[in-house]
Image (spheres, grey):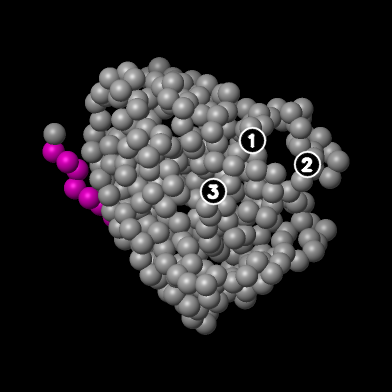
Amino acid sequence: MRRPDPVPSRRTALALSAGGAAALWLPVKADAQTRPPPASLPPEPPPPEAQEAARLLENLLTRLGARVDVGSLRDPVFVIDTGAERTAISDRLADELDLAPGPPVLVHGITAAEVVRTVRLPRLDFSGRRFTNLTPPVFPFAVLGADGLLGLDVLSRFRLTLEVRRRRAMMTPSGPDVDERGFFFNGVASRMPSNITPARSGRFGQLFLTNVQVEGVPTVAFVDSGAQYSIGNLALMRAIDARIGPAARQSIRVYGVIGQSLMVDSGAVSNLRLARRELGATPLLFGDLHAFRVLGLADQPALLLGADILTRFSRITLDYGQSRISLGELIKPPPLRSP
């Protein structure tokens, strides 16, 4: 079979017969001076409208975007990216705001790490909260596919709730006010059923799920809402093949935001169990992402959960302070209509 010609696109390669591909990036500090101390990024006291949810924007690439306020004449769109350690900004928006340069940082891409430039962003308002003195890495708008990305430096101090069905995102204080009967915000109970599972924090603040099985193989998974598609590492692919036999897969190319690319295998699994939820047959990619090595997951079966799986739930809640994840109801796909 002829391998498809690589076509660069926003953060991923699309328009392939297999459906598409996923990519991940994890920016980290180049030295001790490149990452501001936590005290330099305090959220201001929330205004009265802080409990209002930010509207998630429709995105043809399945990623979840929301409008933010960075002091420009317009409200730029940032992708909510729980796989990124730091918030990022496009070169187009950085030039539009005429932001001062910051120190370079080391960014972990899908194949290796590279040093990129940063800028100094005085403030960013999202979901009724303000963050100050950010130094986001800068990426070309053409490959970022958005004005910026909201990373864990902004998200991981809160409980982040993504309501896919209602197209909303909300950040609330992290705390013990969640139980198995539902979600509680300011003493008001939600009727949306929940499925809470404990998680552990990764090196850069990602939440790792251990109650995951792929074709019966115990797997560690982490949520990356900025990736279009879910991808397993090679250890997971080998474990699946050893259990049920080698599967037919197609090789395709994926792209990262710093211009790197990598060949991965595209296929599907017949059974994915995620935190006591049976998702059934699920398309997956498999590849040797640099991110798996950075996160210490290269030698054990691991799975990056992208937006293709996250959007199958009515609600996803990532409570970083309590190290747990809660899943809402599975959204049933619309029935197929006869021509």
In the image, residue 196 lies at what x, y percent? 67, 32
In the image, residue 317 lies at what x, y percent? 65, 40
Which amino acid is tagged 1? Answer: Pro
Q: CA distance from mark 2 to mark 1?
A: 13 Å
- The residue identified by callout 3 is 202
- The residue identified by callout 1 is 198
Residue 304 or residue 165, whichever sits in front: 304
Q: Is residue 248 visible?
A: yes
- The residue identified by callout 2 is 176
Q: CA distance from mark 1 to mark 3?
A: 13 Å
For the C terminus, the quadrant is top left
Q: Secondary structure at mark 3?
A: loop
User: Magenta includes 6?
Assistant: yes
Residue at x 84%, y 39% (from the top left corner) = 188
Tell me which label, 3 or 2, sits earlier in the chain: 2
Tell me which label, 2 or 1, sits earlier in the chain: 2
In the image, residue 304 lies at what x, y percent? 45, 41
**For the magenta stretch, what is the residue range?**
2-9
Residue 45 as seen in the image, left or right of residue 233: right
